[in-house]
């Protein structure tokens, strides 16, 4: 018989590990849709899209674990159209949906920021007592140094090579990057906090119109590396942690998204 874990025990472990109660989030974190009680196979992915649900059904998964789940603040609560199709497919197959947004961004080991630093070979900055240095709301912006001496332009080329996506780069491409700030996903709004912390370059997933002017006028580089591209790694690491802890099968499905 394959190793399995109860839905209740998995939810309890994820809650203890990710501590969602620490965050003021835009969506519910944890078990969003209840499925079967026993879980042998988990599919992980960035977003709970129809494509990911269908991939989970095809793989006979018992649960889906994602970074971007459902029921976002201010969204239409009516269950119809795309939302109805997604929910019907999920519930019809008896699949559980677990989603963790900011808690997965922030986790010190399996979070998106931590895993982006691992992929990019960036070194997070720490204080004398070993406490990691951060800024922005809930300390979501990580600070540190690149893995090699580089300019903003050279850093952006390294990002393109490692993440497989050409980023949008704004600012002085020749500026040396001695202090780096980063926060994955749609965290371009935290650039003010990164500037106040004295970074030479700030890396996030998306870009907004004001971000361009901030970069130009401050002289700080801004690298928009892609929302999906910067957030593929946290949920993979968390899934590996679940597999190692409980022995259940965990499969990552990367549904392509150019954003």
Image: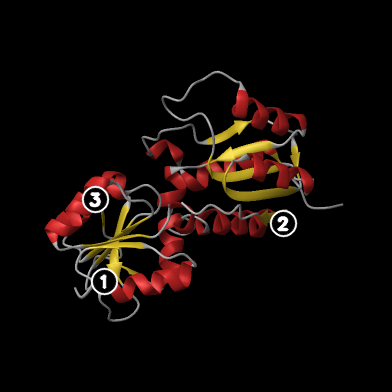
Give the mark nearer the N terminus: 1 vs 3.
Answer: 1
Q: Which residue is mark 1?
A: 152
Within 10 Å of disc 3 (Cα), the crowding (few <14, some 14-19, many 20+) is some
**Mark 3 to mark 2: distance in Å?**
44 Å
Quarter where residue 83 is shown: top right
- Mark whose residue sits in front, 3 or 2: 3
Element at label 2: loop
Q: Which residue is mark 3?
A: 211
Q: What residue is rendered at 87% in x and 52% in y? A: 1
Q: What residue is rendered at 46% in x and 59% in y? A: 109
Quarter where residue 225 is shown: bottom left
Kindly indicate whether the residue at mark 3 contacts the one at mark 1 (C-beta within 8 angstroms). no
Measuring from the top left, give residue 126's x and y in whole percent.
28, 66
- Mark whose residue sits in front, 1 or 2: 1
Give the mark nearer the N terminus: 3 vs 2.
Answer: 3
Give the mark nearer the N terminus: 1 vs 2.
Answer: 1
Report how many numbered discs are placed on residues in the image.
3
* Numbered badge on residue 247: 2
């Amino acid at each position: 018989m394959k190793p399995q874990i109860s839905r209740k025990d998995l939810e309890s472990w994820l809650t203890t590990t990710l501590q969602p109660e620490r965050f003021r989030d835009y969506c519910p974190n944890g078990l969003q849709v209840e499925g079967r009680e026993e879980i042998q196979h988990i599919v992980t992915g960035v977003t709970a899209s129809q494509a990911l649900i269908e991939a989970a059904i095809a793989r006979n998964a018992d649960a889906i674990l994602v970074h971007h789940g459902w029921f976002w603040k201010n969204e239409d609560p009516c269950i119809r159209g795309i939302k109805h199709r997604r929910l019907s497919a999920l519930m019809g197959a008896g699949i559980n949906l677990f989603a963790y947004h900011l808690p997965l961004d922030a986790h010190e080991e399996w979070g998106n920021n931590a895993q982006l630093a691992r992929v990019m070979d960036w070194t997070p900055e720490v204080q004398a007592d070993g406490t990691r240095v951060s800024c922005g709301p809930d300390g979501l912006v990580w600070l540190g140094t690149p893995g090699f001496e580089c300019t903003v332009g050279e850093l952006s080329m390294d990002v393109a090579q490692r993440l497989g996506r050409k980023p949008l780069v704004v600012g002085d491409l020749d500026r040396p990057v001695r202090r780096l700030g980063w926060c994955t996903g749609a965290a371009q709004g935290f650039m003010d906090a990164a500037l106040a912390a004295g970074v030479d370059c700030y890396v996030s997933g998306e870009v907004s119109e004001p971000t361009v002017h901030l970069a130009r006028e401050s002289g700080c580089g801004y690298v928009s590396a892609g929302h999906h591209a910067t957030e593929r790694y946290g949920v993979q690491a968390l899934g590996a942690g679940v597999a190692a802890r409980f022995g259940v099968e965990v499969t990552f499905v990367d549904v392509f998204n150019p954003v």
